[in-house]
Image (tube, rainbow, N blue to C red):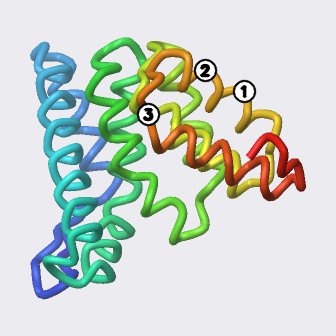
C-alpha cells in the first residue's frame, strides 16, 4: 500500500497485483457486484459534492478538481461498471456531474463518449443540454443542434437547452435562428 496526500487528505493506492487478487476473491465470494455498487455510489457522491462546491464557491474549485483528477481512474471504472448493465441511472448522474472536470481538464472527448453512452441507454432529459454544450465546445454544431432540439421537444420549458441552442446558432453565424 502506498500513501500520498491530496488537499491535505490521505490517499492510498495498492499494487495492481493486489487489486487483481482482491477482485478475484470478491468474484469468488459473489461480492464483486456489491463492492462495485458501493464504489459507484461513493464516486457519484464525491463528484456531485465537488460539482456543487465548484458551482457555489463554498470552497476553492481547484482543490476539488484536483481531487477528482487524482480519482479520475476510479471515476472511469465506476462509469464503465454502471453502463455495463448495472446502474445506468447512477452512471448518468456521475457522467453529468463530471462534466465540469472534463471541460476544465481538457477531457471533452472522453466526456462526450460517456454522455453519449449514458443517453444511448436511457433518454435522460437532464443530460441532453450537458451533451449539447459539450458538442458546442467541440464545435460539433450539427450534433449540438440535434441533441438540443430533442431536449426542447422533451422539455419545452428547458431554458438551458434553448439558451445553448441559441449560442450554437450564434457561433455558426445563423443569427436568424438564434
Q: Earlier in the sequence, mark 3 or mark 2?
A: 2
The image's mark for residue 150 is 2
Nearer to me, 16 or 141: 141
x and y, in percent, of residue 43 in the image:
22, 47
Q: Dividing the picture into quarters, in which one does residue 29 lie?
A: top left
Q: Is residue 35 above or below residue 57?
A: above
Query: In front of the other: label 3 or label 2?
Result: 3
Nearer to me, 51 or 20: 51
**Pointer 2 and pointer 1: residues touching (CB < 8 Å)?**
yes
Q: Dividing the picture into quarters, in which one does residue 147 lie?
A: top right
Residue of label 1: 146
Q: Is residue 123 left or right of residue 65?
A: right
Mark 1 neighbour class, 10 Å CA radius: few under 14, some 14 to 19, many 20 or more: few
Helix, strand or loop status at disc 1: helix
Count the labels in the image: 3
Mark 3 neighbour class, 10 Å CA radius: few under 14, some 14 to 19, many 20 or more: some
Q: Is residue 57 above or below residue 145?
A: below
Q: Earlier in the sequence, mark 1 or mark 3?
A: 1
Query: In front of the other: label 1 or label 3?
Result: 3
x and y, in percent, of residue 46 in the image:
18, 55
Position of the N terminus, as image quadrant, is bottom left
Q: Is residue 27 above or below residue 55?
A: above
Q: What residue do we see at 21% from left, 60% from top?
A: 52
Q: What residue do we see at 10% from left, 79% from top?
A: 9
**CA gap, disc 2 and disc 1:** 6 Å
Residue of label 3: 158
Q: Is residue 152 above or below residue 178?
A: above
Helix, strand or loop status at disc 2: helix
Amino acid at each position: 500500500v502506498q500513501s500520498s496526500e491530496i488537499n491535505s487528505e490521505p490517499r492510498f493506492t495498492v499494487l495492481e497485483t493486489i487489486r487483481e487478487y482482491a477482485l478475484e476473491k470478491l468474484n469468488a465470494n459473489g461480492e464483486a457486484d456489491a463492492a462495485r455498487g458501493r464504489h459507484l455510489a461513493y464516486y457519484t457522491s464525491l463528484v456531485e459534492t465537488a460539482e456543487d462546491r465548484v458551482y457555489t464557491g463554498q470552497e476553492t474549485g481547484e482543490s476539488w478538481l484536483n481531487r477528482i483528477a487524482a480519482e479520475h481512474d476510479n471515476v472511469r471504472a465506476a462509469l464503465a461498471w454502471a453502463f455495463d448493465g448495472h446502474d445506468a441511472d447512477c452512471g448518468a448522474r456521475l457522467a453529468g456531474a463530471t462534466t465540469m472536470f472534463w471541460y476544465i481538464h481538457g477531457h471533452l472527448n472522453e466526456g462526450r463518449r460517456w454522455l453519449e453512452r449514458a443517453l444511448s441507454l436511457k433518454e435522460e432529459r437532464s443530460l441532453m443540454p450537458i451533451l449539447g454544450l459539450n458538442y458546442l465546445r467541440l464545435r460539433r454544431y450539427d450534433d449540438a443542434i440535434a441533441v438540443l432540439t430533442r431536449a426542447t421537444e422533451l422539455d419545452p420549458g428547458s431554458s438551458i437547452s434553448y439558451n445553448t441552442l441559441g449560442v450554437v446558432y450564434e457561433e455558426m453565424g445563423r443569427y436568424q435562428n438564434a
